[in-house]
Image (cartoon, rainbow, N blue to C red):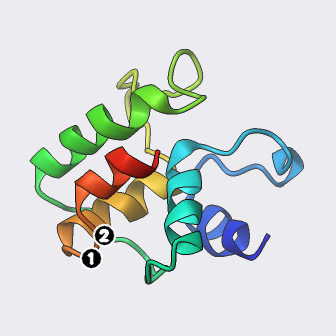
Amino acid sequence: MQLQKDLCQRFCPHFKPSKKDELACLGFLVIKRLLERGVKIPIEQPAMQTPPGIKEELMITLCPACPFFQEDCDFVQRQENALPCGGFLLLKDLIHKKIIPIDIIREIR
């Protein structure tokens, strides 16, 4: 529950308190699994701007395995002004800052 408060409630534009018990997005689950493995992750406001290659590589690595990928993700469907989930934003920032490599996301998802 604390991770949900720290990550989802603060950073995710799609978070709905009434849906706490539904499936979590894969970005959230990857961060949770990294923390469970003892990886130190600073949960702070992620930078909005990172090199475009990181975003595309993370979309290829993370999004197709996410339970919301097929029909429920406006970001993946490239809807106008759609934002990614908070987990995606934090992972993108962690990769950009070289805190975690993208390979660990491939392994842990």
The percent coordinates of residue 89 (x first, y second) are 39, 58
Query: How busy is the neighbourhood of tag 2: few (under 14 within 10 Å), some, or many (20 plus)?
Result: some
Point out the tag, 2 or 1, that comes first from the N-terminus: 2
Q: Secondary structure at mark 2?
A: helix
Q: Quadrant of the N terminus?
A: bottom right
Which residue is disc 1 drawn over?
99
Q: Secondary structure at mark 1?
A: loop
Which residue is disc 2 drawn over?
94
Height in image: 80 above or below 85? above
The percent coordinates of residue 90 (x first, y second) are 41, 64
Q: Residue at x 35, y 25 (%)?
A: 78
Disc marking residue 109: none
Relative to 100, is 45 on the left or the right?
right
How far apart in space, not on screen, are marks 2 and 1 (Cα)? 5 Å
Which image quarter: residue 49? bottom left
Q: Residue at x 33, y 45 (%)?
A: 106
